[in-house]
Amino acid sequence: MKNNILEQLEKQALEGFDKELSQERHKYEALSTCSRIGILTSGGDAPGMNALIRGIARTALYYDLRVFGIQRGFHGLSHGHIEELKARDVSDTLQRGGTFLMSARSESFMTEKGMNKTLAIIEAFNLDCIFCIGGEGTWKGAYSLAKQGVPVMVLPATIDNDIGASDYSIGFDTAVNTAVSAVDKLRDTVSSHERCSVVEVMGRNSGHIAMAVGLAGGAEIVMVPEHPLDLMNDVIGNILSSRNRGKRHYIVVLAEGCGKAQELAKTIEEYTGIESRGTNLGYVQRGGSPSARDRTLASLMGVHSVRTLLEGRLNRAIILKEGVVKDIPLEEAIHIEKVISDDLSKQADILAF
Ligand code: F6P
């Protein structure tokens, strides 16, 4: 008797859930004919890429699409490294750094031969849209596919946070936190020895990581490619003036696009007489479990990207603008440049006084 009641309740609950699910699925039926999507991660990996894959895959499966994981980015796409993903295949990935689909930087994909191979694979697997996760290079690769008539969706993931169209790129928060905790540790030793520490952070040609690390780590000087500093006035002069104001140790955060930590440390020591050491934080910045911010935003961007497809908008870039996840045309997105304002650099100076 008790078991019968439980079975009845279970049946009712399942029916209720299934009804809601089919209503949700029905909503989009008239707007989109897509039924099979591919997902790839390309370029430098970034913490939160797995959360993006999971967000896209789970949402697509919820809306009854079939999902295919493309391994090794565009390289894998042109070589048919593709496997179907089910909901449980993305379990236990949200908290993991890196990308379980793996990544690659592919040059052959951009050649005519590579592109033709890629188009043939997309047709063979009958993929209606390719979801491309990565930074600038990935967005450009996706745009080349779109120009060949392949529908794409792009999502921003790079620790560099240098995608102009989006206020935020997945991975940045985790990378900055990793670098800041390294700067905190360096400060302990640098203050014990009254030294200057030059800390080189990643960012390719951009200074967003350096600026964020400098602000959060309380650096005396932040060097970013967007606002080149004069070695004598702005670096040496600043350190000497800091010493005159009573400072006994110094942190210089150097974006990789501005030079090498060891070399700058040597120059500072030569000119100021202050013992200096250079540290390149390197690839540790790319690893680690994604922060809550990266996991949350990645998940919401994943949902938004699939809904964008289902609503019939193709070739879109998923972005964060003023705190809201949105989509804009990819063609427009790839031409937007990202800046670091003069005033942000000024504020970093003020805070180091
Ligand atoms: O774009 C992310 C990034 O980590 C940059 O900060 C860095 O310049 C570059 O990738 C390093 O690339 P690779 O993995 O090819 O050495």
Image (cartoon, rainbow, N blue to C red):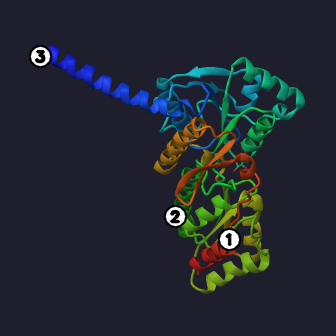
Q: Quadrant of residue 81?
A: top right
> SS class of the residue under badge 3?
helix
User: What residue sits right under mark 3 in the picture?
Assistant: 2
* Residue 288 appears in the figure: no
Where is residue 224? Give x, y as percent: 72, 65
Q: Is residue 5 above or below residue 132?
A: above
> SS class of the residue under badge 2?
helix
**Residue drawn 75% across the image and 48% down it:** 331
* Three-letter amino acid code of the residue under disc 1: Ser
What is the CA distance from the residue labelled 2 to the residue labelled 3?
65 Å
Q: Is residue 219 above or below residue 54?
A: below
* Three-letter amino acid code of the residue under disc 2: Asp
> SS class of the residue under badge 1?
loop
Comparing labels 2 and 3, the label whose residue is closer to the camera: 3
Where is residue 151? Give x, y as percent: 71, 34
User: What residue sits right under mark 2 in the picture?
Assistant: 188
Relative to 240, 106 lies left or right: right
